[in-house]
Amino acid sequence: MNRSVVVGNGAGFWGDWLAAPQSLLADPRLEVLTLEYLAELTLSILARQRQKDPQGGYVTDLPRLMPQLAPWLAQDSQRRVITNAGGVNPLGCVQAVAGVLVQQGLGELPLGVVWGDDLLPRWEQLRSQGWQAPHADSGEPFPQQRQVVCAHAYLGAGPLVECLNQGARVVITGRVADASLTVAAARWRFGWTETDWDLLAGAAVAGHLIECGAQLTGGYSQWWKQTDLALVGYPLAILSEDGSAVLTKPPGTGGTINRHIVAEQMLYEVEDPSQYITPDVTVNFTTVELEELGPEEVRVQGATGSPPPENYKVALAYADGFFASCYLVIYGDRVEQKAQYCAQLVRKRLEHMGRLPQRFHWELLGTGAAVPGQKVQCQGRELVLRMAVHDSDPQKVEAFARVVPSLVTSGPSGIAGYTEARAQLRPVFAHWPTCVPRHLVQPHWEVRPAAQWLK
């Protein structure tokens, strides 16, 4: 008999709808809940939070969700939660979650954590071993004069499977590749090895499809007009032991799943469909077959796989100066001319002060500025002026933030938007895409009862 495991994903990014997991938890088919929170931008935000508070740096949505998840976990010992909410501080996250579980009377529930993706503590050691963090496109070594803010390898499913095999009911990780959360659930349930390439490819495809949450049930789709997204359901993947999967959603929820939407999502963020690289398997999407089984059910099968590369992808961010931006509503006659004049006033005043930032940008939202090459004539009597600056000198960025409000009395008539606080100076963390040899990365994992994480 072909066994199965039902995986539902209740988060596609940090900031996703907090109520989304509720309909998944109410579906009796759900066995493994995944919560996928991380992206390169998210890691930079979490790194900034850890700079401010060494105890922070994890996704605070997870502890907030635990009172909802605790009763679901308590009802059935086979239920699991797998999440990369650990961000840049998995050990801090596991302690926060353990505290909630203890409060919910689940102090004995096994809680697993995976870490070791963070390369920053070993930065100098890795450099001494010859790793130069070459840029993924140019091959240029990472400049030594740059200050690294965070550097995280994208781990695979292996350490998560170890936690699940040791009885963990909740597994919290740092930067693990998105699809690997689902791959881990399949490997744990079916006992697949790390070289069952075609089977792993099938699970990776399913994980890739559900990792962005409601994007598989009608969100962010060309088909959005044909469905009600107000109470959109989040996706379920019924994975079979043969590597196939049926995609669906909880009954009675909004959104929809059909072959068109699944095809859209399958190609989302894919450069080469014949070689979709994950840390677990390299997937050939061109062999995948999609079949509508009925309303809200699509079977995905036929994925083929081959070994992954000998490197892990790394999300590296470095300090790159300071930034500020603002938005002003401009209205009245000759509105485009007036908005451009406002931007020029700000620039000239900064030049006069000797504080013009290295990068000064403005755009007129409402004239096609958001769509490159699509300049249009503003038909109304209002638009939005967006201005942004960037410089390594924070004083120049701060000068911009102080000059903009002066337009309220020393600029043309017809300006609004001063009800908001003035532009805030923010540090810029720039992305440096690179890879690291697998043998230089040291994943760690541990499983303990929740109460013991608090000792």
Image (cartoon, helix red, strand yellow):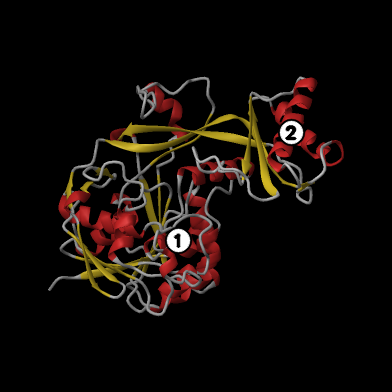
Query: Dot 2 lies on which element?
Result: helix
Residue at screen point 49% across, 72% down = 231
Identify the residue position indicated by label 1 in the image. 11
Q: Quadrant location of residue 425?
A: top right
Q: Which residue is drawn at 25% across and 61% down?
A: 186
Is 54 left, or right, of 20 in this rendering?
Answer: right
Q: Nearer the viewer, residue 200 or 228?
A: 228
**What number is the disc on residue 451?**
none
Residue where numbered disc 2 is placed:
341
- Residue 140 point in image, percent of width and height: 39, 21
Q: Where is residue 207 in the image (x, y as percent from the top left)?
A: 31, 57
- Which residue type does callout 1 highlight? Ala
**What residue do we see at 52% from left, 66% from top?**
65
Percent of width and height locating residue 176? 37, 48
| 304 up-or-down from 169: above or below | above
The crowding category of the residue bearing disc 2, from other C-alpha atoms within 10 Å (few below 14, some 14 to 19, many at least 20), is some
